Amino acid sequence: MQLKGKIINFLGDSITEGAGVTNSENIYLNVLKKEENLTEVRNYGVSGTRISRQIGGDYKNNPVDADFIYRAQNMEDNADIIVVFGGTNDYGHGNAPLGNFDDSTPYSFYGACHSLMKLLINKYPQALIVFMLPLHRLNEDEAVYEYVSGDPAKEDAKKPLKFYNEAIKEVAYYYGIPVLDLAALCPIQPAIEISRKKYIPDGLHPNDEGHKIIAHRLAGFLKSL
């Protein structure tokens, strides 16, 4: 695919919003715009947000609970490419369970992936839709314990981050949506000290150099489609 002149909508969380960079010009989507001569990039990144809808959350009024499904409905329609970059917050915090492939409810991660992908396919029938998998993060192999169902007496363990990556890939495969595996293709691994210092100092949000790598991997991926 030729990228010059394209309009791209980016739906994401704090990484897309720009947490970790020194200024907005260094966010991966703005690096991509400059280097590939895009006509426009639209940043729909909101810090702390998740793909899945939260049980008992107020997704219409609380910015952190405004899940990707809800926000995708309000993105501008005239886009050539849609890039979705999320999932790390679904693992890191919140009460929606991982679920399984057959889920249809947005209140599980699998079900939310189904809901979001179907929404985007219907909203953007002529656009290229792609998903980027979450990057490696500190403690990504640990189970995260969260309260569920609004009951503080009930606490469930979430599976490690790799299960969320696999869920995105599995659902995207079903819909024929291309997936860029950033965890496999970027040298950003905060468990390795030299990598953490160079690319992702806080263990979660890439810095300027990290965003540059994401932009380059995304450019190559989109050009291959």
Image (cartoon, grey):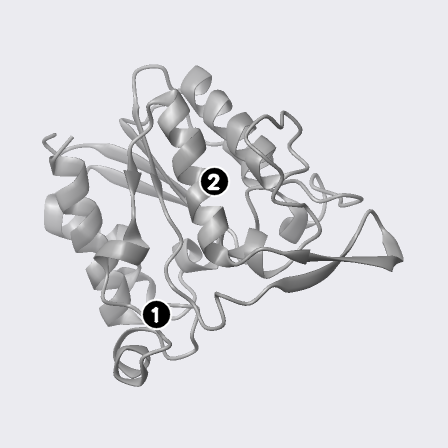
Nearest to N terminus: mark 2 or mark 1: 1
Depth check: give the residue in front, 49 or 132.
132
Tell me the tag on residue 167: 2
Residue type at mark 2: give it.
Ala
Residue type at mark 1: give it.
Val
Image x and y of residue 139, in percent: 49, 72
- Where the N terminus falls, by quadrant? top left
Please tell me how crowded label 2 is: few (under 14), some (14-19), or many (20+) other residues with Cα within 10 Å.
many
Q: Secondary structure at mark 1?
A: loop
Q: Residue at x 19, y 51 (%)?
A: 217
Residue 171 is left or right of residue 90, and the answer is left
Tell me the tag on residue 86: none
| Residue 66 falls in image quadrant | top right
Depth check: give the residue in front, 143 or 49.
143
Q: Residue at x 41, y 19 (%)?
A: 121
Image x and y of residue 24, in percent: 33, 62
Residue 23 is left or right of residue 86, and the answer is left
Residue 203 seen anywhere in this rendered image of the structure: yes
Q: Which residue is mark 1?
A: 21
Q: Relative to 78, is 160 above or below?
A: below
Q: CA distance from mark 2 to mark 1?
A: 28 Å
